Amino acid sequence: MSDLTESENSIETKRLILFPYTSENLSLFNSDIVKFEESYGVIYRGEELDHLLKDFLKRLEDEIASDPENYLFFTEFLIVLKENRHIIGSIDYKYVPRDGVTEVGYGMNPEYCGHGYMTEALDAFLEFGKKLGIKKVLADTLPDNIKSQNVLKRCGFRYLREDGNLWWERTLQSS
């Protein structure tokens, strides 16, 4: 069984491990989720693996293979609860930064909402982003997604504008 924290790019918080998909482990996840779970000692309880998410993960596998130097800027990081090794969601930067700016996205199984996990994950992910040289992070939410808006506010994002979605930004200060 592989240790999730072995990867130099894993992020550890008090209650969570954020574990990035690489071309190898994503290929295994896409082809045999049971073997993936056994190999990493985890249980997948994240977002529903509907056809849209499955298609996205297949495309992500190709994107990682085509740009391995920058994969940390667009791969998904699985959010794993330390206490039971359940994968409860994911978080990612959506693209390689342009002039230091990128966008963050995240999702979580609703069963795990309301415990501060996403706030904890996003805070740690933003710190990780600083180390990667990201200067500003954008995010968007649906107007009725109050829980996600509250996560962004707790993590220091400020409201920018609305264009059907609500847009937010956070400047990352250098340490």
Image (spheres, rainbow, N blue to C red):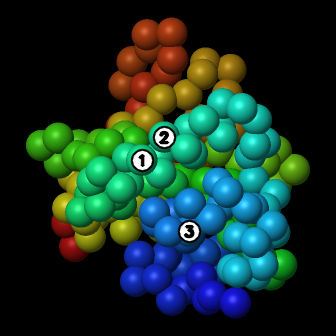
Q: Nearer the viewer, residue 36 or 75?
A: 36
Q: Position of residue 160 (x, y in %)?
A: 36, 25
Looking at the rendering, which quadrant does residue 27 occupy? bottom right
Q: In the rendered view of the protein, which quadrant contains the C terminus?
A: bottom left
What secondary structure is marked by label 3?
helix
What secondary structure is marked by label 1?
helix
The residue beneath circle 3 is 25
Is residue 142 placed above or below 134 in the rendered structure?
Answer: above
Looking at the rendering, which quadrant does residue 57 occupy? top right
Residue found at the very far top of the displayed protein: 164
Going from the N terminus, do you reach mark 3 or mark 1 first? 3
Residue at left 42%, top 47%?
Answer: 62
What secondary structure is marked by label 2?
helix
Category of crowding for the residue at label 2, using alpha-carbon neighbours closer than 10 angstroms: few (below 14), some (14–19), many (at least 20): few
Q: Nearer the viewer, residue 67 or 158?
A: 67
Looking at the rendering, which quadrant does residue 132 occupy? bottom left
